[in-house]
Amino acid sequence: MCFAAAFGLGARIADRIGGPVAGVSAIVLLAGSTEFRNWSMSGMECALAAALGLAAIWAMTYQREWLAGVLVGLAVMNKLDAGFLAIAIAIGLTAAYRRLPWRLVAAAVGTFAPWAIFAQLYFGSVLPNSASEKLVNEAKGVTLDHWWILKRMVLADHEGPAFALAIAALVSAGVLLFRRQRALAAALLALVLWPALHIIAFSYLNFGDTYGWYTAVIYPPTTVAAACTLGLIVRNGWRQYTIAVAALLALILSPVLDIIAFGYQNFGDTFNWYATSVYPATTVAAACALALILAGRWRKQAIAVALLLGIGITVFQHLVDWGKAARALARGHTVSDYEAFEETRKEAGIFLGQIARPGDVVETCYGWIAYGALQATIKEICPLSTRKPVAAPRWHDGIIFRHIRDGPRPGFHLVRSFFSGRSEGGSTQIYQRDGS
């Protein structure tokens, strides 16, 4: 639902700012953003974060500052990095109206404050434990490439043309301000500044790894801003020349960047891959062609298509997964070493559930093994989890797989091991405290 909502909101924002050309372009560009689609389908909060952020910017286009503030507060409650969204919207409104957006601030603070107070009292901090743990401990000894986000966007995800058009939206915002279309200018500034601030922050904050879900939220505002630029270019009467150049850049830029990055020896393979695959950069050209056909017509239908396309992609993605599962059930599949190892964790959890008594404390860093004993109290020792004091543990689990080698802690002895029996090995152990 959130993924589909992001399509509808993105198309509506683009239509408001740049007209039907922008609305249709937003649909096609966002549909081509595989990174956003994949993480939205993963079950994480990326799609919700994008939907709330785009909803707040949509409210800006109608000068509904109180509603935008409430949506910003909900976005920050969902993920604290939505603070960049809040800053972007505040800057956009301040630049457009030459005043501080006190209504936005009041509504956002009023929405977020109850959760912040609860989190501080219950968890001891508004900042999630996983974030502080990653910044303090997980980042130790890890060297962060400060260009990792841009490299991923331009070289791996082929979003270079859309990214360039999004930057050009700053000029478009200036044009809107000159024409005194303040609400639209503020929204367009927010669309550009939100991902820009996010990119800058996550390029320098070292969380110990460069996970894709850190950046999934930047794709919707980037593509919508790019669509707005296309729409405003067309609206200003430079259709044929500018659209042709944009289409050619979209088709040429990403392969060239890939060849530069990965070496000229892969020249043939690279162009063959681009010729036979569907990727986001080509959708810029498709957006241009489709937008010219639909320009000035079927505006409402285009917005409906956005929602239907988002729903359709969602359903298609699930159908693909269900198809794979059905074929695996019908014909079977090759069990990987890791899957076989996972089976040992399942067996260990079942065994633990049979022997642990109510009131026992199970110490774990592997979560669901211990959750096989729901009658027991679980002491989570993984540093990314929030922990509360409990009694001394009677049981703890351990695994041996690849580079991980867990042994019994002092004062514990082995009760049972579960082996995968595969070439790569892998096993799960259950340990009991001595004398218990």
Image: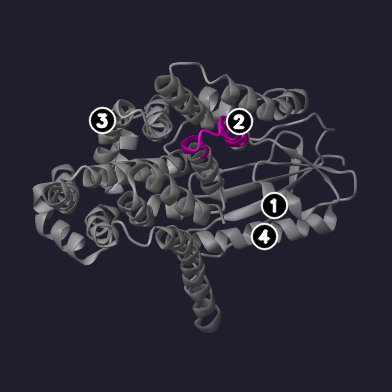
Residue lying at the far bottom of the rendered structure: 330
Please provide the residue range marked out in magenta. Answer: 59-76
Residue at position x 22%, y 60% in the image: 289
Q: Residues within 10 Å of mark 4 (few under 14, many from 20)?
A: some
| Kind of residue at disc 2 | Trp
Where is residue 258 shown, x and y percent of the image? 18, 47
Q: Are marks 4 and 1 in contact (CB under 8 Å)?
A: no
User: Distance from label 2 to label 1 (Cα)?
Assistant: 46 Å
Residue indicated by mark 4:
346
Residues at marks 4 and 2 touching, judged by CB atoms closer than 8 Å: no
Q: What residue type is labelled 1?
A: Ile
First in sequence, mark 4 or 2: give its number.
2
Residue placed most toward the observer, 200 or 424? 200
Q: What residue type is labelled 3?
A: Val
Graded by Cα atoms within 10 Å as few (under 14), some (14 to 19) or many (20 or more), the crowding at tag 3 reads: few
Q: Residue 154 at x, y = what percent?
A: 26, 42
Kindly identify which numbered label has been placed on residue 171. Answer: 3
Q: Depth-wise, is mark 3 or mark 1 nearer the camera?
A: 3
Mark 4 vs mark 2: give the one in front.
2
Of marks 2 and 1, the one in the foreground: 2
Give the main secondary structure, helix, strand or loop, of the magenta stretch: helix
Residue at 86% across / 51% down in the picture? 375
Label 2 sits on residue = 66
Is residue 269 among the parts visible in the rendering? yes
Question: Distance from label 2 to label 3 (Cα)?
Answer: 27 Å
Residue 282 vs residue 25, the one in the foreground: 25
Judge whether 106 appears above or below 273 on screen.
above
Question: Residue 287, located in which quarter of the rendered image?
Answer: bottom left
Whole-percent x and y of residue 293?
25, 62
Instruction: Find disc 1 in the rendering and name its residue.
Output: 369
Density class for disc 2 (Cα within 10 Å; few <14, some 14-19, many ≥20) is: many
Question: Is residue 328 or residue 314 the one in the foreground?
Answer: 314
